[in-house]
Image (cartoon, rainbow, N blue to C red):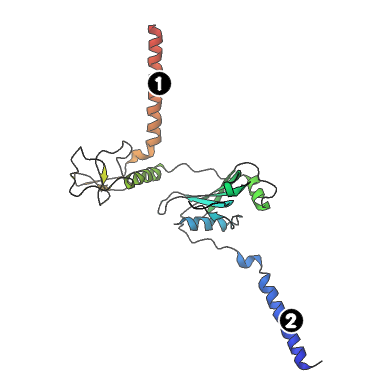
Amino acid sequence: MSTGYLLKLCAATVAGAVLSLAVAVPTWAVTLVPPTPPITTPEAAHAAVLATGAPFDGFVALTSDLIGASNYYEVKGDAGSSADWIVVYTYGWGDCQAGCISTHSFTYQVDPATGTATFISSQGPSLPTTAPEALRTLSASGGGAASPSPDWGALYEQWYNDFVASLPDCAPGVDPTDLSVTTCRQPDGSVVGPIPLWAPAPRPGPWPVDSGGTRGDDGWIQELPKIILAALLAWVGGAALVGWSKSRGE
């Protein structure tokens, strides 16, 4: 056997060993690295969930033009808000080209400050035996964290911002004191014209008022749900009292 043949044989053996190592990548080499907090984008919130080892790496983001997908996710939240991101993963089966006959969802909560992702709940019909084992195991666990109380201040701010964004631009030279002006939005974001009862305070922190001074955060925003409930209870009680009075009169 010639020396040249032996050298070629050794080279082929080494090349095969290197190739096998490249194909059989150990799991620790592909471990996802959690995104660096704060979590400011939907993509980062999704990455934070994947970094926990959750079995959703093959899921795609839900968009308006997504058709026929059976594994997708949706991220709910706003960049810059202190409220947690909510990431909902949906696994569907049964004619998904037409929208999926059945779906099962998994909900995660992501803390924007720390990047901590917590499995909250699993909802929907039982997963079929054809579903990935990891998803069936996760569904059986059911989630263990309680949902936090709503951040009413953040929600109110978002409602107001949505309301302002829906308004048309004001005409040049509009008179803010004219009560007949149709509600519109000034270039600086201020609102001219009548506004709903729930939208008198735009956002937390000091902001200008008509007198030229400043006004702090309206603490009653946090009490808004209680105010609404109290008003409803008062209305129901009043209606019951009127009905009782009429029945006695008859």
Q: Which residue is mark 2?
A: 13
Q: Contact, CB < 8 Å: mark 1 with mark 2?
A: no
Q: Is residue 114 visible?
A: no
Along the line of sight, which residue is nearer the eye, 99 or 220? 99
Q: Residues within 10 Å of mark 2 (few under 14, many from 20)?
A: few
Q: Position of residue 67 (x, y in %)?
A: 54, 52
Image quarter hosting the N terminus? bottom right
Q: Is residue 54 above or below residue 6?
A: above
Q: Is residue 12 above or below residue 238?
A: below
Along the line of sight, which residue is nearer the eye, 68 or 224? 68
Earlier sequence position, callout 1 versus callout 2: 2
**Image position of 91 (left or right of 19):** left
Q: Position of residue 52 (x, y in %)?
A: 58, 56
Circle number at residue 237: 1
Along the line of sight, which residue is nearer the eye, 207 or 15? 15
Question: For the residue marked with disc 2, what is the amino acid?
Answer: Thr
Question: For the residue marked with disc 1, what is the amino acid?
Answer: Gly
Q: Quadrant of residue 103?
A: top right
Q: Is residue 15 above or below residue 150?
A: below
